[in-house]
Image: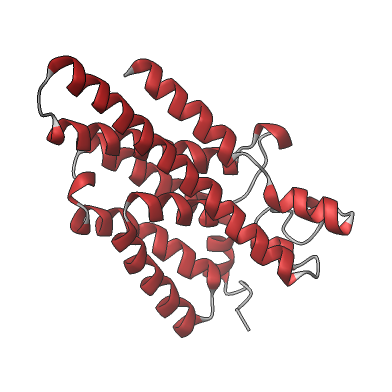
Amino acid sequence: MTTATVIVVVVSYLLGSIPFGYLLVRVFRGQDVRQTGSGNIGATNVARTGSKKLAVATLLLDALKGYVAVVIAFWLAAHIAIRINDTMSATLDVLDVHVGYRLAALAAFSAILGHMFPVWLRFKGGKGVATALGVFLALAPLAVLVSLVVFVVAVAITRYVSLGSILAAAVFPFAAWWLNPGTRSAAVMFPIAISSLLIIIRHKDNIRRLLAGTENRFR
């Protein structure tokens, strides 16, 4: 499993580190999105360049790269399981599930880390929300639904998108444990929990503004 783990980590990180927001704004508007607004490469800051279409494209592509990273991890785990079963002539379904989710959770963490700290932009990336949406959707779709409900309700009540994102990230590990049996192990929950924590930490400036009452509201 060592080789498979290395492959998953490297591929997922590189996928996650593709700076779609930066690339789209550079190609279609001739600007550096890092010189706009918060300096973030995510969809919200891309929208501040004046192009909602590029912002939507950034959101979808950032989510897609995370989704693909986890799907690749599941595929690799299944491929390994088939080879083991053929060799041993045994049924290893339970083991296969655990191996798959361990690799998938590691892929999720690596993709989010790649988005936050992309090697191509001197390790200065985004907050990871859209990429997390993609990886978590592939990992535990029902839990994502719960997080989305929390996000929508929080934004509808407070008009703070950042608060909705923080709460959604905080809720996801608990929802995943509750709704998806495949995640109920320390080896799977640890990278999921760390991923959520990283997203919250990346919102530290938003948290300061929320506490100070100076955070911008969604209109």
Q: For the N terminus, which image quadrant?
A: top left
Q: Quadrant of residue 116?
A: top right
**Residue 119 image position (x, y, % from top left):** 66, 31
**Residue 160 image position (x, y, % from top left):** 54, 75
Q: Is residue 22 above or below residue 56?
A: above
Figure disc tally: 0
Q: What residue is shown at x 72% (from left), y 37% (from top)?
A: 121
Q: Pick whichever, 177 or 219, lies toward us.
A: 177
Q: What residue is shown at x 19% (from left), y 58% (from top)?
A: 178
Q: What residue is shown at x 42% (from left), y 42% (from top)?
A: 70
Left or right of residue 55, residue 99 in this image: left
Report whether residue 82 is seen: yes
Q: Quadrant of residue 33?
A: bottom right
Left or right of residue 91, residue 195 in this image: right
Report whether residue 203 is seen: no
Q: Is residue 48 above or below residue 123?
A: below
Q: Pick whichever, 72 or 186, lies toward us.
A: 72
Q: Residue furthest left?
A: 90
**Residue 154 image position (x, y, % from top left):** 43, 76
Q: Residue furthest right?
A: 30
